[in-house]
Image: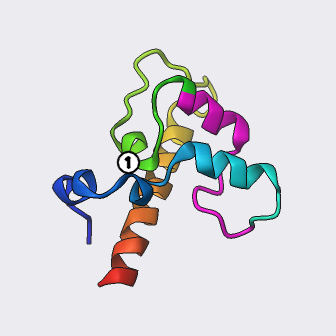
């Protein structure tokens, strides 16, 4: 079941998985069960520099400048990160339902 954009947009900032907070949590290297496991500190900082501050904005992010594009993987990594973000919101919705 996919959440509607209206529900996600209406949620408070704390429910959108802030990348600044997540980056601080990942710095400790002590959080095995943190969301978005394939995005490390450097990528989170890169997203923040691109004005993508939370997982909700990640779902809507279009890499028009090919910042995350590579010849080998193309946009596969970005699609994986978006899928992880969507799974985070879906799991959260299932827990609250």
The question of residue 4 being in magenta is answered with no
**Residue sitting at x 39%, y 64%:** 89
Among the 4 quarters of the image, the one containing residue 92: bottom left
In the depicted structure, whether residue 12 falls above or below residue 1: above
The question of residue 39 being in magenta is answered with yes
Secondary-structure class at tag 1: helix
Residue at image mark 1: 56
In the depicted structure, whether residue 78 falls above or below residue 18: above
Q: Position of residue 38 (x, y in %)?
A: 65, 51
Among the 4 quarters of the image, the one containing residue 4: bottom left
Label 1 neighbourhood size at 10 Å, few (<14), some (14-19), many (20+)?
many
* 79 left or right, relative to 39: left
Q: Position of residue 78 (x, y in %)?
A: 51, 39
Q: Looking at the rendering, in which quadrant would you find the N terminus?
A: bottom left
* 35 left or right, relative to 94: right
* 85 left or right, relative to 69: left
The magenta stretch is: 32-48
Whether residue 68 is visible to the viewer of this picture, yes or no, is: no
Viewer-closest of 37 and 77: 37
In the depicted structure, whether residue 44 falls above or below residue 12: above
Among the 4 quarters of the image, the one containing residue 67: top right
């Amino acid at each position: 079941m996919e959440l509607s954009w209206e529900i996600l947009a209406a949620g408070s900032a704390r429910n959108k998985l802030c990348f600044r907070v997540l980056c601080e949590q990942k710095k400790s290297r002590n959080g095995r069960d943190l969301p978005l496991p394939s995005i490390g500190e450097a990528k989170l900082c890169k997203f923040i520099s691109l004005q993508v501050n939370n997982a909700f904005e990640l779902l809507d992010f279009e890499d028009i400048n090919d910042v995350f594009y590579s010849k080998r993987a193309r946009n596969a990594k970005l699609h994986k990160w978006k899928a992880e973000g969507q799974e985070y919101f879906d799991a959260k919705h299932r827990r609250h339902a």
